[in-house]
Image (cartoon, rainbow, N blue to C red):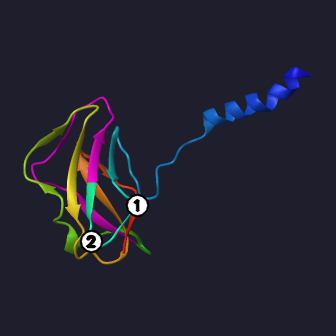
Amino acid sequence: MRALRLLPLVLALAACDTLRVLPPEGAVRADGFSLTADRPSYDNRDEVTLTLRNDGPERGEMGVLACAALEQRTDDGWTQDLAHNDRACIMLLVYVEPGSEQAAVVELEGVPDGTYRFTHRVSGVEVATASFEVR
């Protein structure tokens, strides 16, 4: 009788092993790299702190001119906001060692209201923040 009471718990625990945790809407992680924004919404006068993290085993590299691209969510999907894509650029080669991160502060001055994300290329792969709102 006691074994029958434990069966639902055992089945629930077994099911937990098969659950997948999906990244937030818009987020892209690749080869251990992730890009995050510090908040889910901003005023268009705010600054965003972007953090590129390397949880993979290999050193990542960005540069010589690397920019985090601002993309806006439209009915057609994610499209680059070309008028506002000079906000987070580096002009030199930067390495991101395993277990480390790089942060940058980006101004949103003049960005129209909408749903956005930042994307960035590191070591040949593209990562993206989760979507965030600008109002």
Which residue is at the front of the view, 25 or 108? 108
Q: Which quadrant would residue 132 be assigned to in this image?
A: bottom left
> Overall secondary structure of the magenta stretch?
strand
Q: Give residue 101's position: percent from left, percent from top.
A: 25, 40
- Which residue is found at the position 27% from the left and 60% from the top? 48
Residue holding disc 1:
40
How far is the residue under mark 2 from the one under mark 1? Answer: 18 Å
The quadrant of the rendering that contains the N terminus is top right
Residue on which disc 2 sits = 81
Residue 11 drawn above or below residue 46:
above
Residue 27 image position (x, y, % from top left): 40, 54
Q: Are marks 2 and 1 in contact (CB under 8 Å)?
A: no
The vertical placement of 56 against 62, above or below, is: above
Q: Residue furthest top?
A: 2
Point 42% across, 73% down: residue:
76
Q: Amino acid at mark 2?
A: Asp
Q: Residue at x 25, y 72 (%)?
A: 45
First to last magenta residue range: 50-73
